[in-house]
């Protein structure tokens, strides 16, 4: 059966952040992910996880200045020192939270910077991060993101991510395969999961259009989830969607998958 983690940056926003752990557990989730932990002490988050019997399965490295539109630095030539400092901080949180995946965000492609230079920067940063993270049992992951939600994001397609991962080694780094982004950019999502399965270390889901819960849009999710399960994917699928209404009221789709 597919395993779903609540993304508590987008779900349970009726509550303050630290109260969302209990709400996710009460709704039947065994794991959570979120975008960024850095506004809270790691020990406080670790306590919320433990008290609610939850595993932390993914979060993002520091993205740079989010309010100024930055969305990571991993592919940006000249920003390597900042990337490394951020990744070290993320790794400290991952150790405290026993979290096995850190999403390394590539960043927006700046005008005039050659594509190949960005690919080389991303690959070098990722290889460095994987080396540092391996002893802690942490795997860095990269995520192709659609250009409607984040215009100009460097990593846009699953084939682009796959080429970078294969150059470093899938045992060291993985793909964060967000089914929502794939549906928008590429479509044919089951075939693409099938193609990249050995590289996929984490998945995420939201329906399209709207980025709301499964069942609110155009995708036949029971079919997709059955296929992902039949293909043998045993990682986590983060529910990275904005509930169309109240979070718990929109969890009907999740009933068949509660462990
Ligand atoms: O899909 C997304 O937007 C996220 O997984 C993310 O990490 C960047 O916002
Ligand atoms: Mg995502």
Image: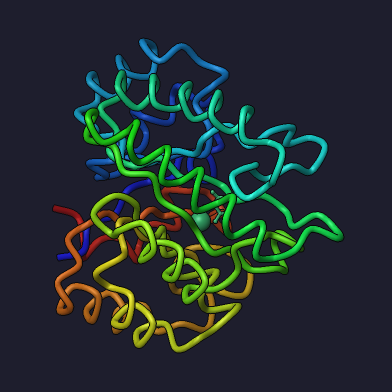
> 23 or 99, which lies in front?
99
Residue 86, image x and y in percent?
55, 27
Say which quarter of the image contains residue 44. Answer: top left
Q: How is the image coloured?
A: rainbow
Q: Is residue 239 visible?
A: yes
Residue 134, image x and y in percent?
26, 36
Residue in the picture at 32% in, 48% down:
5
Residue 191, image x and y in percent?
35, 88
Figure check: 73 above or below 94: below
Q: For the view shown, which residue lies furthest in the right direction?
A: 111
Q: Is residue 26 visible?
A: no
Give left or right: position of 248 versus 200.
Answer: right
Figure check: 94 above or below 230: above
Q: How many marks can you see?
A: 0
Residue in the picture at 30% in, 65% down:
199
> 112 or 259, which lies in front?
112
Give left or right: position of 69 versus 130.
Answer: right
> 61 or 183, which lies in front?
61
Is the N terminus in the top left, top right, bottom left or bottom right quadrant? bottom left
Residue in the picture at 72% in, 68% down:
148
Residue in the picture at 62% in, 35% down:
80
Residue 117, image x and y in percent?
67, 58
Figure check: 215 above or below 119: below
């Amino acid at each position: 059966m597919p395993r779903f983690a609540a993304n508590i940056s987008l779900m349970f926003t009726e509550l303050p952040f630290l109260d969302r752990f209990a709400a996710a557990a009460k709704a039947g989730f065994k794991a959570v992910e979120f975008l960024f932990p850095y506004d809270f002490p790691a020990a406080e988050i670790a306590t919320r996880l433990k008290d609610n019997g939850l595993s932390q399965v993914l979060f993002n490295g520091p993205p740079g200045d989010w309010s100024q539109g930055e969305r990571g630095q991993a592919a940006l030539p000249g920003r390597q020192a900042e990337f490394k400092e951020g990744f070290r901080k993320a790794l400290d949180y991952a150790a405290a939270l026993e979290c096995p995946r850190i999403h390394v965000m590539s960043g927006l492609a700046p005008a005039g910077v050659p594509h190949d230079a960005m690919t080389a920067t991303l690959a070098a940063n990722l290889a460095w991060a994987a080396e540092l993270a391996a002893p802690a049992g942490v795997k860095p992951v990269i995520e192709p993101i659609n250009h409607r939600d984040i215009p100009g994001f460097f990593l846009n397609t699953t084939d682009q991510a796959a080429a970078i991962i294969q150059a470093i080694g899938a045992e060291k780094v993985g793909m964060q395969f967000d089914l929502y982004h794939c549906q928008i950019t590429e479509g044919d999502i089951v075939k693409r999961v099938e193609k990249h399965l050995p590289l996929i270390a984490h998945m995420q889901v939201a329906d399209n259009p709207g980025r709301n819960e499964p069942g609110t849009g155009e995708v036949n999710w029971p079919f997709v989830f059955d296929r992902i399960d039949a293909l043998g994917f045993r990682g986590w699928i983060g529910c990275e969607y904005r509930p169309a209404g109240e979070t718990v009221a929109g969890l009907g789709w999740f009933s068949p998958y509660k462990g």
